[in-house]
Amino acid sequence: MLVPLSHVLALPEVAAASPAVLFGDPDGTLIRWVHSSEVFEMGPLLTGGELLLTTGLGLRGTSAAAQERYVEALADAGLAALALELGRTFSEVPEGLLRAADRRHLTLVSLREVVPFAVIVETFHRLVMDQEIAGLRRGERIWRELTNGVLDRGGLHALVGRIAELAGGAAFLVARDGRLVAASHPATEVPRATGDNSRPVEFGRASWGTLILDTRRGQLRGAVLDRAASVVALELMHAGSAQDTVALTSALLYDLVHDRLPSGEELRTRCEIAGFPTRRGRPLVALSVAADRRLQRALLRSSAQRACTEIFGACLVGEVDDEVLMVVRVPRGGEADLRQRLDTLSSKLSDSMERTTGHSIIAVTAGSPVDEIDEVARSIAQSREVATIARRLGTRRSAMLARDLGIYRLLVQLQSGPELSVFLREQLGVLLDHDTAHGTELVRTLDAYFRHGLAKTETAGALGVRRQTLYNRLARIGELLGGDPLTDYERRTALSVALHAWQLRTGLDPGQRRPSTSG
């Protein structure tokens, strides 16, 4: 259950902390979970929709730029709101946090009194439980009323009228192209759809349009919207409408992802209907977009449709499982041309989304090209896997092919077993322990040394240290690891693979300086 931040801040136990909202709309910020942490690298550990409580201990001694990176990572992960307790680490909210929160439209709250975070977490969970019990009773009644409206066969306009009565206001059904399909009351202007007053109506696993309610009864409005959108989809299905290209394309991609197509002939026919003729002779490739989780997928899909058509020509673009997927033909210039066009697509999407929403594109990823449409499901699976890895690694505005992350794709297959943990401990354990105990940067140094092809001058420059300092660090690495780890080909290869595995597992770049936590 999602709870408006304003409800959380109004709880007596939370209000005792004297919260002040510095950025964001507490009524429109919906909280799924409350979590507390002082970890600087928190972004990769979040799944979206959280209120994060922190005293700022992990930010102590950091620069404004590091503070901005901290907020950027949280926003990329879909954090709903950040609450900073003042008094322990900071007397005022740092400028880096303020700038980044404003830029990324992340709700930022300051807590000026000390309240144990455990109390806030427990209070939130009690609130959710109480609302779920009340919501179940109310939801049963709403669902029964709305489904009776479909069974009565009064049609779409009558159903929209019944939705308005239940919500105590006016209801509007708007198609994806902006057409007003049905309204409970005459209106010269349809209210602007927001996350609070509207829900997408999905038909055939694709966005068909939007149901909008104009009423001040916020809690009841949400309960009606959550159920009414599904009931409207049932009525549309009954009426046989919504056979548009977006719905057809998304349904086709969904069936490809979930292996639901019985024959290649059906696949080719449905591609033709969706406007993507399956001519032979041009390889196909699937693309995925890894983006800020708070981006509306319908908006991202629409932008991707325009950009992809402009860059690649005829294409399939749809929403599947909250992802935007594309299938295009490989350009005649081969891989070099494909990479260039992917870079252009990534830049166009990033610029468009940042300009209109403030949110970011993490990466546009491509699977391996395939010769026949019957094989495109394999390319789709690869592009989605690379998108997941790109999100984990925290890349930004990047375009990449499946083979660019081949080492990570291989390592992903080992994550579920104990072997990878044993391998990591065997190869890097002594260096990680030394860095933790002594505040050194041996792992970072080793990573930079490998990334710069064992060139000492370039490595020292990248680390910002003198050559003699680098020599001392490399000597210390050799002493700790034993033998000739930096010159022996087998040892060096194993260490390089371990560095990649550590980055995949932690979401941290071994080559990036960790912010200081010293006073």
Image (spheres, rainbow, N blue to C red):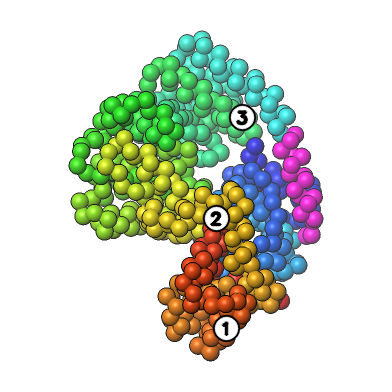
Three-letter code for the amino acid on which mark 1 is drawn = Ala
Q: Residue 127 in magenta?
A: yes
Q: Quadrant of the C terminus?
A: bottom right
**Residue stretch rendered in magenta on the structure:** 113-130
Residue sitting at 37 percent across and 38 percent down? 377
The amino acid on which the numbered mark 3 sits, given as a three-letter code, is: Ala
| Within-10-Å neighbours for mark 1: few <14, some 14–19, many 20+ | few
Determine the residue positioned at 38% across, 28% down.
Answer: 261
User: Which dot marks residue 75?
Assistant: 2
* In the image, farthest residue toward the bottom: 468
Residues 20 and 195: in front is 195
The residue that appears at 51% across and 79% down in the rendered structure is 463
The x and y percentages for residue 411 are 51, 54
The one nearer the camera, 326 or 468, is 468
Q: From the image, which quarter does the N terminus lie in? A: top right
**What is the number of the mark on residue 223?**
3
Do callouts 3 and 1 mark residues in contact (Cβ within 8 Å)? no
Q: Residues within 10 Å of mark 3 (few under 14, many from 20)?
A: some
Q: Is residue 19 left or right of residue 505?
A: right
Sequence-wise, which precedes: disc 1 or disc 2? Answer: 2
Membership of 386 in magenta stretch: no
Taking the spot 45% from the left edge, 58% from the top edge, the residue there is: 407
